[in-house]
């Protein structure tokens, strides 16, 4: 029983150690990733309905193609890549570690055969004297050697960039660190959004969820609400333009109040210059123009006039106990009714009892509501606009782990690609000198170096 | 003198250099090959001056930014990086004939930039999203990486042609034009070397892009099509480097993988901007 079990374990181990698996996973990840760049990710359902048939949509949903980079199967591919990385590294490490703990310091005849670069020469003098000369030579031309003696033979061994052998492990390890950083971010951080009107403030933000295309219920809104623990006020929002009309800068002035104390006062934030407070970062992300409407209500009989101010969606009480609510508005009605022009607002007139009534008011046609024949006559006087800034609110405690991983990756790649572990062995045996060399990378360059070195030695 | 005149001059010089290399391939005259290289070097110097001048012109206009901000500028810069890598290889290895397969990439890029109908070639101020020092680091590292992959692709095409001819002629060494090609072993090695240079640069390009995205948008990775394609390219070349460790993935298979990698690179650079939508839309105009 044990033998079959260990047989299974070892074949599983070999499977995860194999470089074939690495190549398969890398090519697999590359091909699979293409899908999500062609099918829009996390788009509203009606967009998919326009693009694909119903059965295609069902198939794609089953395969998680609408959010594929967070799907179980894609995560599994990344997970297998990590396992493969760790297994390969563990398998290779002991062999490379031996170079650190017990390097081959003595080049005997058997080892000499395994080296491609070997030169021989004869030099006069005693072995001890030659040993000292060669030690000084190697120290000067290459690196300080280790000298050992065996049966009247002297062995010299010098090496450079031994640590470069670890480069590949650093790169593999760094990828795992990046994954850990990403996981820390997704478990302990959030990505949220909040819109603040000029002069307004907030102490919450709303988690970004894939849009479902439906209006969110109060429960959903409550579930997506994140308490910041302090208050952010938008003092001002502004846009500046270049002469050619291109936007130059979007800027919000933010003030943060924590426990009743102003800790950050009117700090400007722009795109590419966010604000961080208590690990939460605010990014200038979007903006909105928020209209405020001014209406006049006239009593048809008495002629008494009342001015009314309303925001979109706000219920405002009007004389007589009714309410008024702006449902929709447009700056230019012509796009809907070519014979009309100017701003227009669609309102709901909600009486204390009975059905709400819909009315359309046009700013440039003040008499239009007279024709309705109601007791109250409405006119649309003007619109004011205020800015509302849209802030991306992000907490990501894992981001520094990700940057650490990236730094290790870049460092590791440079060590692994461009530094080679070079070793030189010398054997001194009664006037006969054998020199061997090996490099684990960039063999031609090392060969040139080795030839120059041995020429110098022979010229001595 | 305007930078656009200099860009036109550089395009002409690259074109001349390419023609000379073609003649060199047919005639095998050493002088022709050398003049091809000299034309490429001159074009490179002129283009370097043009990029510098365009940079200065943007300051004169009051914008003041590196000329790396729209499709026109990026295509021109891509040509410049390809020639830079070619000049370095030319100086180091002296295999002139590589120019036959590398210069067309640069000539095509320059010609497209100068003649492309839809491309806006004016110096424009920077959109808020692009106003960052990361722009320079990100674009330079990415494009040097792309250029190294372009050279690897050119060398791989040479490899594939040469091996095909050698097989066609029986086992004997191919004569004629093929004799001008570096030995297949050298081509294979150059392919590997170019990717060894391109891969770290691409890695740096992706990381600087992620750092910039984090700073500007609060998200270092959003699986945006551009990001995803850069990762696809990274996966392909990572596979190439790992496949090389095992036997059997040198030579022809390595050359094919290198060509596939460059096709993916070009799609990442142009295809994503022109065909897919995403955060990198400013690169499409």
Image: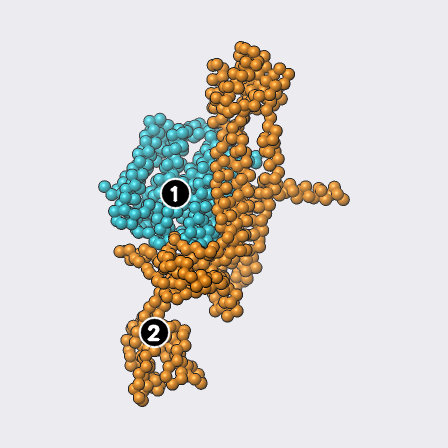
Q: Secondary structure at mark 1?
A: helix
Q: Position of residue A318 (x, y in %)?
A: 37, 81
Q: Secondary structure at mark 2?
A: strand
Q: Position of residue A438 (x, y in %)?
A: 54, 26
Q: Residue at x 57, y 53 (%)?
A: A73
Residue B239 visible in the displayed image? no
Q: Position of residue A331 (x, y in %)?
A: 32, 70
Residue at the extreme top of the image, as rendered: A124
Report the front residue among A55 and A333.
A333
Chain whose colour in the figure is cyan: B
Label 1: chain? B
At label 2, counting other C-alpha atoms closer than 10 Å, the crowd grade (few under 14, some 14-19, many 20 or more) is some
Q: Position of residue B224 (x, y in %)?
A: 46, 53
Residue ID for mark 2: A293
Q: Residue at x 26, y 56 (%)?
A: A243
The image quarter containing residue A351 is bottom left
Report the front residue among A349 and B4.
A349
Residue ID for mark 1: B140
Residue at the extreme bottom of the image, as rendered: A301
Which of the image's four quarters has the N terminus of chain A?
Answer: top right
At label 1, counting other C-alpha atoms closer than 10 Å, the crowd grade (few under 14, some 14-19, many 20 or more) is many
Residue A293 visible in the displayed image? yes
Chain whose colour in the figure is orange: A
Label 2: chain? A
């Amino acid at each position: 029983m044990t033998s079959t079990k260990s047989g299974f374990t070892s074949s599983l181990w070999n499977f995860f150690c194999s470089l074939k698996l690495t190549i398969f996973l890398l090519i697999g990840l590359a091909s699979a990733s293409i899908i999500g760049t062609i099918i829009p990710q996390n788009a509203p359902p009606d967009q998919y309905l326009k693009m694909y048939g119903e059965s295609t949509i069902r198939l794609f949903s089953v395969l998680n193609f609408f959010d594929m980079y967070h799907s179980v199967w894609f995560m599994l591919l990344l997970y297998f890549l990590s396992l493969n990385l760790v297994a390969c590294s563990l398998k290779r490490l002991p062999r490379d570690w031996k170079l650190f703990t017990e390097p081959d310091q003595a080049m005997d005849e058997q080892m000499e055969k395994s080296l491609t670069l070997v030169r021989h020469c004869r030099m006069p003098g005693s072995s001890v004297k030659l040993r000292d000369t060669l030690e000084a030579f190697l120290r000067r031309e290459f690196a300080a050697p280790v000298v050992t003696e065996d049966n009247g033979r002297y062995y010299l061994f010098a090496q450079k960039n031994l640590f470069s052998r670890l480069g590949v492990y650093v790169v593999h390890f760094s990828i795992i660190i990046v994954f850990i950083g990403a996981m820390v971010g997704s478990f302990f951080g959030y990505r949220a959004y909040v819109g603040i009107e000029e002069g307004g403030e907030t102490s919450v933000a709303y988690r970004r969820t894939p849009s479902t295309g439906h209006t969110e219920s109060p429960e959903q809104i409550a579930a997506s609400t994140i308490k910041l623990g302090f208050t952010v006020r938008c003092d001002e929002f502004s846009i500046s333009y270049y002469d050619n009309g291109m936007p130059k800068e979007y800027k919000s002035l933010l003030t943060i109040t924590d426990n009743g104390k102003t800790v950050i006062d009117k700090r400007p934030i722009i795109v590419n210059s966010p604000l961080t407070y208590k690990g939460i970062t605010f990014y200038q992300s979007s903006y909105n123009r928020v209209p405020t409407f001014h209406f006049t209500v006239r009593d048809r009989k008495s002629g008494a006039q009342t001015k009314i101010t309303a925001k979109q969606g706000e219920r405002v009480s009007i004389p007589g106990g009714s309410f008024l609510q702006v449902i929709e508005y447009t700056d230019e009605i012509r796009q809907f009714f070519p014979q009309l022009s100017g701003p227009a607002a669609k309102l709901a007139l909600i009486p204390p009892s009975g059905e709400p009534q819909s009315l359309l008011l046009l700013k440039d046609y003040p008499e239009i509501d007279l024709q309705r024949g109601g007791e109250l006559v409405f006119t649309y006087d003007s619109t004011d606009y205020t800015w509302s800034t849209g802030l991306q609110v992000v907490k990501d405690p894992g981001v520094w782990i990700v940057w650490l991983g990236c730094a290790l990756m870049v460092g590791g790649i440079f060590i692994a690609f461009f530094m080679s572990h070079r070793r030189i062995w010398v054997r001194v045996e009664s006037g006969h000198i054998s020199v061997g060399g090996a490099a684990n990378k960039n063999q031609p360059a090392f060969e040139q170096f080795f030839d120059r070195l041995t020429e110098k030695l022979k010229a001595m | 003198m305007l930078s656009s005149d200099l860009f036109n001059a550089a395009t002409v010089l690259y074109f001349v250099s390419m023609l000379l290399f073609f003649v060199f391939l047919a005639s095998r005259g050493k002088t022709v090959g050398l003049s091809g290289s000299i034309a490429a070097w001159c074009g490179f110097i002129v283009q370097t001056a043009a990029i510098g001048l365009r940079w200065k012109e943007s300051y004169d206009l009051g914008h003041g930014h590196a000329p790396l901000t729209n499709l026109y500028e990026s295509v021109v810069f891509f040509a410049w990086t390809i020639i830079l890598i070619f000049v370095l290889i030319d100086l180091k290895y002296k295999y002139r004939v590589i120019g036959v397969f590398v210069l067309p990439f640069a000539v095509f890029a320059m010609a497209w930039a100068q003649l492309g109908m839809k491309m806006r070639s004016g110096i424009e101020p920077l959109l808020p999203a692009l106003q960052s020092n990361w722009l320079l680091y990100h674009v330079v590292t990415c494009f040097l990486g792309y250029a190294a992959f372009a050279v690897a692709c050119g060398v791989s095409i040479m490899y594939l042609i040469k091996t095909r001819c050698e097989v066609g002629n029986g086992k004997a060494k191919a004569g004629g034009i093929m004799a001008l090609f570096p030995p297949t072993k050298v081509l294979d090695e150059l392919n590997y070397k170019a990717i060894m240079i391109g891969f770290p640069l691409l890695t740096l390009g992706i990381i600087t892009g992620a750092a910039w995205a984090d700073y500007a948008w609060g998200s270092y990775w959003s699986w945006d099509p551009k990001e995803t394609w850069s990762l696809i390219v990274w996966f392909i070349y990572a596979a190439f480097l790992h496949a090389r460790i095992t036997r059997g993935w040198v030579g022809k298979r390595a050359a094919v993988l290198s060509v596939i990698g460059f096709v993916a690179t070009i799609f990442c650079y142009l295809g994503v901007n022109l065909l897919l939508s995403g955060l990198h839309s400013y690169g499409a105009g």
